Amino acid sequence: MYDAEPGSPGFLSELLQRLRHERAFTLDSSPGYCRDYITLDDTVASLIAMGEQRACDIFNVASGVNTFNQDIADALRPLGVDIRFSRSGEAMQLARCHIDNLRALGVAPADTLHTLQTLVRNLPA
C-alpha cells in the first residue's frame, strides 16, 4: 500500500517523498523485484465497500498487477527521473493476486504506473 503524503511508510511512498528533492539516484534494490501495489485510497474504498455490502467472502485487497522495479523506473524516465539499482538478479516470479471478489463489490484499483506518473507530475517543485 502506498500514499504520496509526507511521512507515509513503504517503498513507493518513500520513493515519492525522495522525488520531491531529487530526480536521479540509485536504489538499494533490484530491477527484477516486484510487488502488487495499491493506493491507500483504494485500500480504504475496499474496506468501506466490504463493510457496506456486508461481504463475507475472502478478498485480496490489491491491485491485481505485479509491478517490477524496472517498470517503475521505465515509467518515470520520460518525466526526467533516473532510477538505477545497486543489485541485479533474476526477475521475481510472484503469484498474481486475484481481485475478482473485490471488483464484484465495485472496487477498481488504480493502475500503479499511471498513478505514479500522475503523482510525480504533481509533486511540488
Image (cartoon, rainbow, N blue to C red):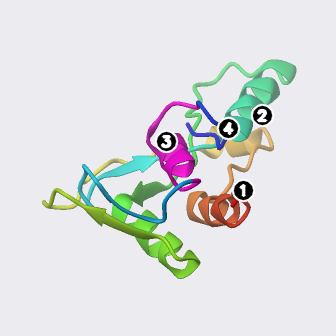
Give whichever of 118, 50 is nearer the camera: 118
The outermost residue toward the bottom is 78
Q: Which residues are magenta?
A: 8-20
User: Which of labels 1 and 4 is toward the front?
Assistant: 1
Residue of label 4: 5
The amino acid type of the residue labelled 4 equals Glu
Decide: is 90 above or below 74.
above
CA separation in Å, label 2 and label 4: 18 Å
Q: Is residue 13 magenta?
A: yes
Q: Main secondary structure of the magenta part?
A: helix
The percent coordinates of residue 35 (x first, y second) are 40, 47
CA separation in Å, label 1 and label 4: 12 Å
| Mark positioned earlier in the residue sequence (3 or 1) | 3
Which residue is at a point 68% across and 54% down the rendered structure image? Answer: 110
The amino acid type of the residue labelled 1 equals Pro
Q: Secondary structure at mark 4?
A: loop
The amino acid type of the residue labelled 2 equals Ala
Q: Which mark is residue 124?
A: 1
Q: Which mark is residue 42?
A: none
| Mark positioned earlier in the residue sequence (4 or 3) | 4
Residue of label 3: 14
Tags 3 and 1 in contact by the CB under 8 Å rule? no
| Mark positioned earlier in the residue sequence (1 or 4) | 4
| Mark positioned earlier in the residue sequence (3 or 2) | 3
